[in-house]
């Protein structure tokens, strides 16, 4: 027997005993601000199941990279999360043959409001969630082998030979990578809450808070820390600390079995 419940995102948040996520993020200028996390093997998503989620506010309609690894060098196993010029959230992966497979949500999130985004890949199917609401599923083709690369993770844009491009303009915070496909209940329950550092399947958890600190701390037990700008020291590419914002509460209809 099945019943359909009207779930309110705020209610699910209240049911969680975890603390609220940090109330600050990083503001990227859309010109040459960037953040770097040095390479770690587990930061390669490969072609297996995974989830990447984060809070964002885009302040412009333009092609922008939010997070990537190996895209600027076009290395096999590279991946990236981006916004199209129409404001749609999307995902790309560099296949073993050197080709590229991409999926576009066709859902505009560049509206000047904060949104929680979750990208869930299971086998060759990618699911997009916005503010905990399922948006669409797309297929990923010709993934090939489980390739990895040794590139750094780049947050807020791309850089190659001191040339900055596809830079994000707006706020980013609470970027989390999981090594499995999370379901909608898990996304809803924790999107406004902190998660334990040793949570099962948690690969990285960059809150992007901490005010003026140079380090971007990974709150997972893996401690894959990064830094603002293009170097571990302060430089002209450091994003600034920004105030937090949340989307309006939206009702979500989910069917659950009994």
Image (cartoon, rainbow, N blue to C red):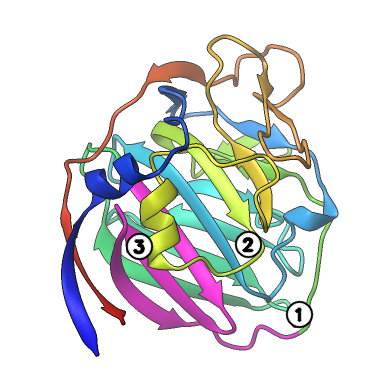
**Front-most of residues 208 and 20:** 20
- Image-based side of 192 in relation to 101, left or right: left
> Which comes before the other along the chain, label 2 or label 3?
2
Q: Residues within 10 Å of mark 3 (few under 14, many from 20)?
A: many
Check disc 3 and report the residue beneath it. Answer: 129
- Image-based side of 168 in relation to 75, left or right: left
Q: Is residue 138 magenta?
A: yes
Name above or below for residue 103 compared with residue 65: below
Q: Position of residue 220 (x, y in %)?
A: 69, 40
How far is disc 2 from disc 1 in space, using C-alphas?
12 Å
Residue in the picture at 46% in, 54% down: 82
Q: Secondary structure at mark 3?
A: strand
Q: Is residue 41 magenta?
A: no
Which tag is nearer the camera, tag 2 or tag 3? 3
| Magenta region, residue range | 116-144
Q: Position of residue 15 (x, y in %)?
A: 34, 45
**Front-most of residues 221 and 204:** 221
> Which comes before the other along the chain, label 1 or label 3?
1
Residue 103 occupies quadrant: bottom left
Residue 147 occupies quadrant: bottom right
Query: Dominant secondary structure of the magenta stretch?
Result: strand
What is the total number of numbered labels drawn onto the structure image?
A: 3
Q: Position of residue 69 (x, y in %)?
A: 68, 53
Q: Residues within 10 Å of mark 2 (few under 14, many from 20)?
A: many
Name above or below for residue 68 compared with residue 121: above
Check disc 1 and report the residue beneath it. Answer: 96
How far is disc 1 from disc 3 in space, using C-alphas?
27 Å
Residue 35, disc: none
> Which comes before the other along the chain, label 2 or label 1?
2
Whether residue 62 is visible, yes or no, is: no
């Amino acid at each position: 027997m099945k019943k359909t419940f009207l779930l309110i995102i705020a209610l699910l948040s209240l049911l969680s005993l975890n603390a609220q996520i940090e109330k600050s993020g990083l503001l990227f200028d859309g010109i040459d601000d960037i953040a770097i996390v040095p390479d770690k093997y587990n930061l390669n998503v490969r072609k297996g199941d995974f989830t990447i989620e984060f809070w964002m506010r885009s302040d412009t309609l333009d092609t922008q990279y939010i997070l990537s690894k190996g895209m600027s060098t076009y290395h096999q196993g590279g991946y990236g999360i981006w916004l199209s010029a129409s404001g749609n959230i999307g995902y790309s992966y560099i296949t073993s043959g050197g080709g590229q497979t991409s999926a576009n949500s066709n859902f505009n999130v560049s509206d000047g409001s904060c949104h929680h985004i979750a990208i869930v890949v299971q086998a060759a199917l990618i699911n997009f969630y916005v503010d905990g609401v399922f948006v669409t599923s797309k297929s990923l083709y010709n993934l090939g082998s489980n390739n990895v690369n040794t590139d750094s993770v780049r947050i807020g844009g791309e850089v190659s030979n001191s040339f900055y491009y596809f830079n994000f303009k707006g706020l980013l915070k609470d970027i989390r990578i999981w090594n499995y496909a999370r379901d909608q209940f898990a996304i809803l329950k924790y999107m406004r809450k902190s998660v334990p550092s040793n949570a099962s399947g948690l690969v990285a958890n960059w809150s992007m808070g901490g005010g003026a600190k140079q380090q971007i701390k990974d709150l997972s037990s893996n401690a894959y820390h990064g830094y603002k700008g293009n170097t571990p020291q302060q430089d002209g590419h450091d994003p600034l600390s920004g105030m937090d914002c949340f989307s309006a509460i939206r009702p979500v209809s989910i069917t659950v079995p009994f």
